[in-house]
Image (spheres, grey):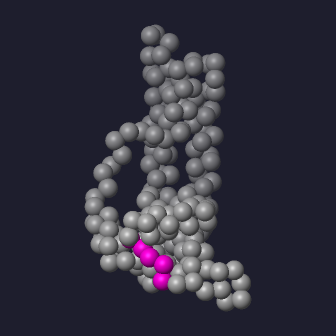
Amino acid sequence: MSTRHVLLGLLAGGPSHGYDLKRRYDERFPQARPLAYGQVYTTLQRLVRDGLAEVEGTDSDGGPERTLYRSTEDGGRELTRWAGEITPPAPFVSNEIFAKVVVSILAAGDAVDPAALLREQRAAHMARMRELTALKTDPGADLTTVLSADYALAHLDADLRWMNTTADRLATLTAEVTAA
């Protein structure tokens, strides 16, 4: 996910302080990788440097000085361009579960048992799916929470299907490695 574009999207709603952008990010992207305050401010500085955002002013409200940022016209165009681009499917498999299973099979008994790894990983996935299902079915859940939970559930489900297929193939995969 592009932090700069997400922040531009949040600024599209109107001028904001970095602290408010971080808070709205947490609200709108609850299942996403957490965003640190330092990353927000660094990204805002780069957006200003690149002419995609500008400082609208500062205030203190009796506390520390806070800078108010707003998107520029160029920032709005950049956001529209980025949001309209089709994201290509990932060309490479970069999932840690995949790597651990392959390494376990290649190590042929010297590492973790791949069947046990898959069983334990499936149990962890199922527990997370129950958490997400409870989260999205909560009567107070907002649309963002439901959408992000659905997205995460779909990915967990795909992982589970892969784990089940791989578990069914373990004997064949292990035999191929030991024969080689």
Q: Is residue 150 visible?
A: no
Q: Quadrant of the N terminus?
A: bottom left
Q: Toward which corner of the image does residue 41 lie, by quadrant? A: bottom right
Looking at the image, residue 20 lies above or below residue 111: below
Q: Is residue 180 above or below residue 38?
A: above
Task: Identify which residue, 63 or 147, lies in the foreground.
Answer: 63
User: Residue furthest toward the right?
Assistant: 62
Viewer-proximal residue, 157 or 87? 87
* Magenta segment includes 42: no
- Label the magenta part by its dominant secondary structure: strand
Q: Residue at x 55, y 58 (%)?
A: 33
Which residues make up the magenta segment? 52-56
Horizontal side of residue 157 vs 124, given as left or right: left
Residue 131: horizontal and vertical position, in percent? 62, 61
**Total numbered badges shown on the rendered structure:** 0
The percent coordinates of residue 54 (x first, y second) are 44, 76
Residue shown at 45% from the left, 28% from the top: 169
| Image quarter in which the C terminus is found | top left
Q: Quadrant of residue 26?
A: bottom right
Residue 51 image position (x, y, % from top left): 38, 70
In this rendering, would 57 be left or right of 123?
left
Q: Indicate left or right for 15 with 73 as reference.
A: right
Quick one: which residue is furthest to the bottom in this view? 61
Residue at 50% in and 52% down? 156
Q: Residue, x 61% and y 86% (percent of image)?
A: 59
Furthest residue to the top?
Answer: 179
